[in-house]
Image: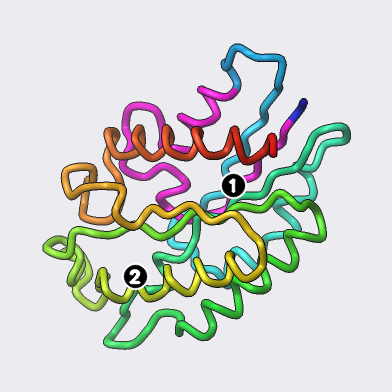
Amino acid sequence: MKFNIVIFGDSITYGVGDNEKGGWVNRLRLSLENISSEDEYNVFNMGIDGNVTQEVKERFASDLKPRIIKDFKTVIVFAIGINDAQTFADKDRVSIKEFTDNIAWLIQEARKYTDDVMFIGLSRVDETKVKPLRFDTSKSYDNAKISAYDKKLKNLCLNNGVFYLPMFDFLDDADLLDGIHPNSQGHKKYALRVEEEIISFVKD
């Protein structure tokens, strides 16, 4: 079979922190495109630094439509939400209600194009480095808050029959470059986990 895998996300999806192979999505692409099988994979990285769910909503259709190819099975992956959970100037950058509404919208819209929709769960941070951020003390990340957003994401996926891949406890502090972005080792681990799941997912 032929698969078009379109991955939406933020700076972690884009690959920030991996100066060896450009991030977990690029590692996934290199692995899948060179896999020894009769299947053919295209992997598209739609990660943009700093994005929240609202921004993915705004660009979703325009980014997706040019990457739908006839005779290829479209697979849409979302790895978004950690920036929504950010605290900015002592306020939620994106309220948990707005986050929940945005995820519900993305599920509904994605299903207009394919039944193969996957969400990758939010990952934990090293609070000693990001609570607050060292380069901008008005911004902060908190694991309890990230976990609360992640649970909303998981419940929405389960209630809508969408595949959810948990990531919260997967990476260790040693896998993080700056407390939030994986380093090269972290991106490698991330890519291997996603690849293991996505191959079985797309062939179900």
Image coordinates of residue 155 in percent, x first then y, are 52, 71
32 relative to 133 in the view: left or right: right
- Residue 139, quarter of the rendered image: bottom left
Whole-angstrom CA distance, mark 1 to mark 2, is 21 Å
Q: Where residue 21 appears, x then y in whole percent?
A: 39, 28
Q: Quadrant of the C terminus?
A: top right
Q: Amino acid at mark 2?
A: Ile
Residues under numbered marks 1 and 2 in contact, where contact means CB atoms less than 8 Å apart:
no
Residue at the far left in the pictured view: 128
Q: Residue at x 18, y 70 (%)?
A: 131
Label 1 sits on residue: 7
**Colour style of the rendered protein structure:** rainbow
Give the answer, above or below, for where 85 lies relative to 18.
below
The answer to whether residue 58 is seen in the rendering is: no
Residue at screen point 60% across, 50% down: 77
Residue designated by label 2? 146
Residue 43 on image: x %, y %: 62, 34
Q: Is residue 181 above or below residue 92?
A: above
Does 155 sit left or right of 127 as displayed? right
Is 9 one of the magenta-colored residues?
A: yes
Q: Position of residue 151 (x, y in %)?
A: 43, 71
Residue 24 appears in which quarter of the rendering? top left
Front residue of this view, candidates 78 and 22: 78
- Seen in the picture, residue 74 relative to 37 is either above or below; the reply is below
Answer yes or no: is residue 181 visible.
yes
Q: Which stretch did the figure color magenta? A: 3-32
